[in-house]
Image: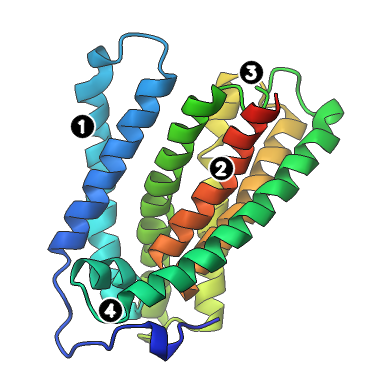
Amino acid sequence: MHHEQSERPQPTTTPPSIMLPLVVVVVATLVTQLCSLACTYDGRFLTILVPSALVLSLITVPLAITGLSLGQRIGLGAPLLTSLLNRDPGSGRWLVTDAKLSISLGLSLGTLLLLLRYVALPFLPPELPALGHRGVLGGLFVSIGAAVGEEVWLRLGVLTILAWGFLWVIGSREVSQSVGWVSVVISAIAFAAIHLPQLASHGAANGIGIMATMAGNTVVGILFGYLYWRRSLLAAVLAHFAVDIVLHVVSALMA
């Protein structure tokens, strides 16, 4: 699934600056993550605001800079976001096309995972929190924060670095099918693994809990990685948001 030429702005001879998309990506990540934390933290949020912002910056800024700069060299990065910020002709059509595809795929996969969760409920650890336990508002902010932050870190950052590293080893500058899929799968496994500490914090890190967490997050991570690779960073963000809306907001409404 490649970008249709009519949907994409025509490339320029000089690569655009990464400064404006970098600022947007970093600010969006910090704001959405801190809002999500504010809605879910049980203590006094102001006491952890500064250290949380510092840690988030130390994670986000290097990954965003690396992903945007290396991405420009190998056809990844954030070309749609850059085109939108530069108001390039055709960028709006590109966004609409990506949004339709990614949201429909995300809602479909989210619905499937929600159904599987209810079917598997008798086999899951009883300590595992119920879907929607944060409530509608908390689930909404968690969905936004995860969609932005995790796609910036895992797809723009990790996936791009992996793809660039593989291309450097083989001496190529084009992301082939093999390089693309290996990078997508590895970054999806890393995405799944970062959810294990949260599982352990609830005391649900037994064999079934770990397998379910790894399997489910790897599957959605593959979808997000594929959309980032083949469509855009914004497509991955929107698909992630659509999946999480079903799992965290719709499930809260159904509770």
Mark 1 / mark 2, whichever is N-terminal: 1
Element on which disc 4 rests: helix
| The quarter of the displayed image where residue 160 is located | bottom left
Amino acid of disc 3: Gly
Amino acid of disc 2: Asp
Which residue is pictured at 66% across the width and 32% down the height? 251
Element on which disc 2 rests: helix
Mark 4 / mark 2, whichever is N-terminal: 4
Q: Is residue 25 left or right of residue 75?
A: left
Q: Do labels 4 and 3 touch, CB within 8 Å?
A: no
Element on which disc 3 rests: loop
Mark pair 1, 2: CA separation = 26 Å
Which residue is pictured at 39% across the width and 63% down the height? 233
Q: Badge 3 is on which residue?
A: 203
Mark pair 1, 3: CA separation = 28 Å
Q: Nearer the viewer, mark 1 or mark 2?
A: 2
Mark pair 4, 2: CA separation = 31 Å
Q: Badge 4 is on which residue?
A: 73
Q: Do labels 1 and 2 touch, CB within 8 Å?
A: no
Mark pair 2, 3: CA separation = 22 Å
Q: Nearer the viewer, residue 240 or 100?
A: 100
Across and down, in percent, residue 113 comes to 72, 45
Mark number, residue 54? 1
The answer to whether residue 43 is visible is: yes
Q: Do labels 4 and 2 touch, CB within 8 Å?
A: no
| The quarter of the displayed image where residue 117 is located | top right
Which residue is pictured at 54% across the width and 63% down the height? 102
Mark 4 / mark 3, whichever is N-terminal: 4
Q: Residues within 10 Å of mark 3 (few under 14, many from 20)?
A: some
